[in-house]
């Protein structure tokens, strides 16, 4: 059973004066507020647990809010909180509610955010009030303490959007790892749950990629596909990705492939040691750091020790048969052979002179 | 020289996880002094070549075979030499640059097929 009112809401003006009942579009505002409550609470929890990379699993499930009824006298939705058995997250939702209230109050009165509001949540905060027309407003906050309430109207909502715009920038070549947890075929977008637990939305996919994205959509937690999204993203002042405005690629990260690369590196190193010509440690380290990039060609990729402490990588990519050799002195030789046209190309460099970057580009499919 | 139509057997010891032979198998190592060791099918079958190779203590996951004419390089019939196994032939990489060695090895890999053991 509901334990009592968790948050006070009181809509008035415009459509909210017209008649009894609550306009359905206002429900979206309540849902948005609930999401913001959870996300801000999560940030507060992480702030108090700097040693933890992620908030507890199913953090948001601990906030079970219910719209119990809508009282008349303008529109006053009564939102109660249903108790859940677990209390893993303490009173972070109460703190979150009060911080959101104080933030909106301060923006309305001082045109500035309080210092303790999580900057990563400003874009979501700025979406509050989106449904309001001129003359409409709502008061919200603590269920009983009227001093802990704020009012949101179109002017304050516009200020929130202005502040959000000043705090975000578009950043190209941004990568995020996580899981696809929602897919909207109407808007061709998907949402990611990043590996640190944050939700990132707005990732637009191409029609051609739809089937692949659907295949990665998490329907069963025991069968999650880790993916990496890259493209242009909106990032906040702390560098956190808020949403993707342009997705360049989505690819699956194959953990078993990375493990296979680790194994192959270890075997090559052991073989070189046994031959009395060890592979230099910084070459092994450089390849170890590229294990995912190498693994992206799995299973058509191999690493072997070659003469005198050298190491050789081979991989196939379409018609191209590619290889990279790193000699014991750091000389790097890259070569590609097109099996269809029989044309080949080569590149020579040194690990001390940006050869790692050239190898990265080659592994990503850039031609020599 | 070996006839272009001769089938040459090469022992493969390095493969991708999916079983594809790596091109490193089809070019000589430093100790080979530029000569890629093969066996001629007219004198030794793929299975025998594989078994003899293992019998000498060398590693091999199988025999891959290709036509002598498929390579742009000279294939020397050195089967009469005293210290070579029956039907031996050497693909001559000696005059090649590093890039040319890569190209030649990958050309052979592209045409070579696994002839023993059969999957």
Image (spheres, coloured by chain):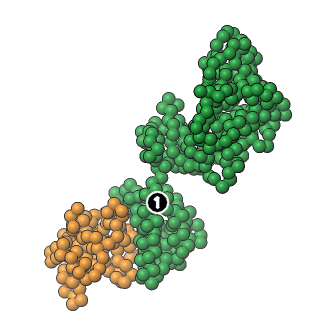
Q: Chain of mark 1?
A: A
Compare residues A320 and A284 and report the one nearer the observer. Answer: A284
Image side of residue A277 versus residue B53, left or right: right
At horizontal 38% and vertical 60% (from top left) the residue drawn is A300
Compare residues A84 and A221 and report the one nearer the observer. Answer: A84
Query: Can the viewer see residue A67?
Result: yes
- View extreme (top): residue: A19
Q: Give the chain coloured green.
A: A
Q: Give the chain coloured orange.
A: B
Compare residues B101 and A324 and report the one nearer the observer. Answer: A324
Q: Quadrant of residue A92?
A: top right
At horizontal 67% and vertical 42% (from top left) the residue drawn is A90
At horizontal 25% and vertical 64% (from top left) the residue drawn is B113
Image position, residue A324 (x, y; %): 46, 68
* Residue at which label 1 appears: A258
Image position, residue A351 (x, y; %): 56, 71
Q: Quadrant of residue A163?
A: top right
Query: Can the viewer see residue A170?
Result: no
- View extreme (bottom): residue: B82
Image position, residue A263 (x, y; %): 43, 67
Q: Quadrant of residue A209?
A: top left
Q: Is residue A127 above or below residue A137?
A: below
């Amino acid at each position: 059973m509901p334990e009592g009112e968790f948050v006070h809401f009181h809509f008035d003006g415009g459509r909210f004066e017209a008649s009894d009942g609550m306009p359905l579009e206002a429900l979206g505002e309540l849902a948005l507020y609930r999401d913001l409550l959870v996300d801000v609470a999560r940030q507060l929890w992480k702030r108090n647990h700097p040693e933890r990379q992620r908030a507890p699993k199913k953090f948001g499930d601990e906030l079970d809010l219910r719209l119990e009824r809508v009282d008349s006298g303008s529109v006053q939705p009564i939102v109660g909180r249903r108790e859940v058995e677990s209390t893993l997250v303490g009173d972070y939702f109460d703190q979150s509610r009060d911080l959101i209230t104080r933030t909106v109050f301060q923006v309305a009165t001082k045109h500035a955010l309080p210092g303790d509001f999580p900057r990563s949540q400003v874009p979501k905060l700025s979406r509050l009030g989106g449904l309001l027309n001129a003359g409409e407003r709502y008061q919200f906050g603590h269920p009983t303490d009227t001093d802990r309430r704020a009012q949101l109207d179109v002017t304050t909502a516009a200020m929130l959007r202005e502040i959000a715009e000043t705090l975000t920038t578009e950043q190209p070549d941004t990568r995020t790892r996580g899981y696809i947890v929602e897919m909207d075929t109407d808007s061709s977008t998907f949402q990611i749950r990043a590996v640190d637990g944050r939700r990132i939305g707005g990732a637009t996919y191409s029609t051609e990629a739809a089937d692949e994205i659907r295949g990665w959509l998490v329907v069963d937690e025991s069968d999650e596909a880790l993916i990496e999204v890259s493209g242009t993203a909106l990032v906040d002042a702390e560098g956190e990705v808020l949403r993707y405005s342009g997705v360049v690629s989505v690819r699956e990260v194959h953990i078993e492939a990375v493990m296979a690369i680790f194994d192959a590196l270890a075997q090559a190193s052991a073989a070189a040691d046994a031959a009395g010509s060890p592979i230099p440690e910084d070459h092994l380290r450089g390849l170890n750091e590229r294990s995912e990039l190498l693994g992206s060609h799995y299973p058509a990729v191999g690493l072997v020790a070659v003469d005198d402490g050298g190491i050789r990588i081979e991989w196939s990519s379409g018609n191209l048969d590619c290889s990279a050799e790193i000699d014991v002195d750091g000389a790097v030789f890259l070569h590609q052979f097109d099996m269809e046209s029989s044309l080949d190309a080569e590149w020579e460099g040194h690990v001390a002179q940006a050869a790692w970057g050239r190898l990265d580009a080659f592994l990503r499919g850039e031609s020599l | 020289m070996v006839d272009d139509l001769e089938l040459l057997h090469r022992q493969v010891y390095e493969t991708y996880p999916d079983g594809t032979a790596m091109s490193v198998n089809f070019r000589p190592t430093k100790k080979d002094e530029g000569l890629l060791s093969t066996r001629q099918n007219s004198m030794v079958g793929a299975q025998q070549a594989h078994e003899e190779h293992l019998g000498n203590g060398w590693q091999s996951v199988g025999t891959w075979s290709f036509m002598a004419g498929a390579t742009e390089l000279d294939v020397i019939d050195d089967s009469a030499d005293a210290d070579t196994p029956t039907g031996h032939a050497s693909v001559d990489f000696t005059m090649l640059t590093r890039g040319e060695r890569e190209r030649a090895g990958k050309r052979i890999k592209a045409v070579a097929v696994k002839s023993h053991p059969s999957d």
